[in-house]
Image (cartoon, helix red, strand yellow):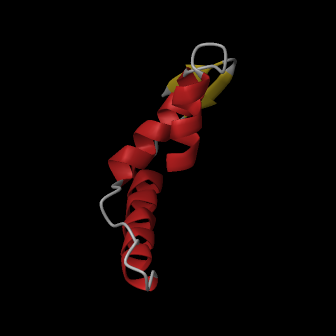
Amino acid sequence: MEKLKGKVFVVNQDYTNLKRKLSKIISQINSVANTEGKGRDDLTFEILNEAEGILRRVTKEQSKAVRLLADKIK
């Protein structure tokens, strides 16, 4: 469980597993659907999960660049 600004984020294993599967499927689709060879399949669920965590923890005042990168990953 993670708490930020009065909001509680509950970690649910079933939800996490579904997000992991969806992330993998989107990554696979992206890698083959891009006909110019720029599709990526190396961005894993863990990277997405960390980017979401950064967006919850890091404020714009702390680091706009870090938030921008995390947002682009998401």
Residue 63 at x, y = what percent?
Answer: 57, 19
The one of 50 and 70 positioned closer to us in this rendering: 70
Residue 43 at x, y = what percent?
Answer: 35, 56
Decide: is 34 above or below 17: below
Q: Residue furthest top?
A: 62
> Going 43% across and 81% down the picture, which residue do you hit?
36
On the picture, is 4 further left or further right than 32? right
The count of marks equals 0
Decide: is 42 above or below 53: below
> Going 66% across and 14% down the picture, which residue do you hit?
61
> Going 42% across and 79% down the picture, which residue do you hit?
29
Residue 74 can be seen in this image: no
Residue 70 at x, y = what percent?
Answer: 52, 38
On the picture, is 16 further left or further right than 65? left
Q: Residue furthest left?
A: 42
Residue 8 at x, y = what percent?
Answer: 61, 27
The one of 60 and 55 positioned closer to us in this rendering: 60
Residue 59 can be seen in this image: yes
The one of 63 and 56 positioned closer to us in this rendering: 63
Decide: is 74 above or below 7: below
